[in-house]
Image: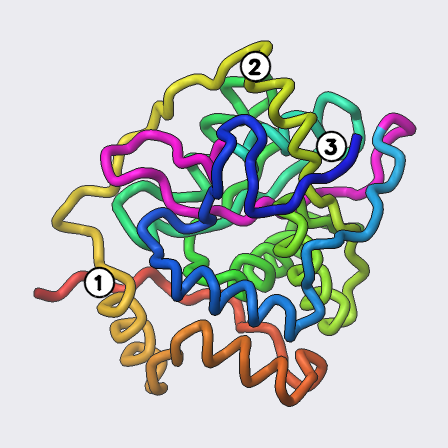
Amino acid sequence: MRALPDIVDPGRGRADPARPGAGAVRRGGTLALLALLGCGRRATPLPPLDQGPVVDAAIVPGCPAEEDGRLSFCLERRALWAVHLWRTGAVPAFITSGAATYNRWVEAEALASTMTAMGVPREAIHTETQALHTDENVAYSMHLADQLGFARLGVASDPSQARGACKMLRAWERPCVELAADYEAVHAIRVSEGVPPLALEPVPADAWMPLKEREQAIAEAAGERPRPPSWWVYGSRALTDPLLDHPPPAPPGPEPTLSR
């Protein structure tokens, strides 16, 4: 099956932004940065998926649920792709990654809940619930994989993100298999089986921080400056090429405490 462009979902027939609510400028800037990083839409061909495991575990980066708690197209797409990889036997374990970044639903848990509802054993899914950005999805999952004894990692996501995330892992001296989503396989599952509603409770309103406030609290706890916007982080890395000269984010510390 051929992989369709990563911003088009044939099951929906329209553009499918990875971050609901993000404006056209943000999406355009993200695509431009992916191009600078060498993360264009053409992904590395998938390895054979029907000949046994191709990795010890696959990282599945999160994206936000809808504000009312429904699955976003992005979450649905990535969860169904992970389900497909499990069913083929190509991936025996997963690390879903992502905090309650843009709203009160934890991205990693939303992915895990959907995957479990569609037959992936819960014990095969490990959750990383503190990452706020793609480089943190990758780095924090890498640290967790080390603790779990997973040596061969892949990234199961949209083609551009799978490629960019694997580039980060390789820059950090870790092998990585790009498991770029085959949208026709995803669509086949959606059509034949449907997608269960998200069965997940949100983070309590009095315990959730908007992203900017959360980053400020994390920086203050570490005695550092807040992280610059992602467009600056990834853009500066692309222009200095390097990813190679940028170490991975350190393992996350304790969750910041809400103070309002």
Distance between mark 2 and mark 1 Cα atoms: 43 Å
- Position of 178 with respect to 223 (left or right) is right
Report the number of numbered marks: 3
Q: Provide residue 123's location: percent of width, then percent of height.
A: 59, 28
Are the two marked residues, 3 and 1, in contact with CB atoms closer than 8 angstroms? no
Q: Which residues are magenta?
A: 50-76
Res. 142 mark: none
Q: Residues within 10 Å of mark 3 (few under 14, many from 20)?
A: many
Task: Name which residue lies at 56% across and 41% down.
Answer: 8
Res. 257 mark: 1
The quadrant of the picture occupied by the N terminus is top right
Of residues 48 and 139, the one drawn nearer to the viewer in this rendering = 48
Which image quadrant is residue 132 in?
bottom left
Is-magenta flag for residue 36?
no
Q: Residues within 10 Å of mark 1 (few under 14, many from 20)?
A: few
Res. 191 mark: 2
Q: Tell me which numbered mark, 3 or 1, is placed earlier along the sequence.
A: 3
Q: Which residue position is annotated with label 3?
A: 92
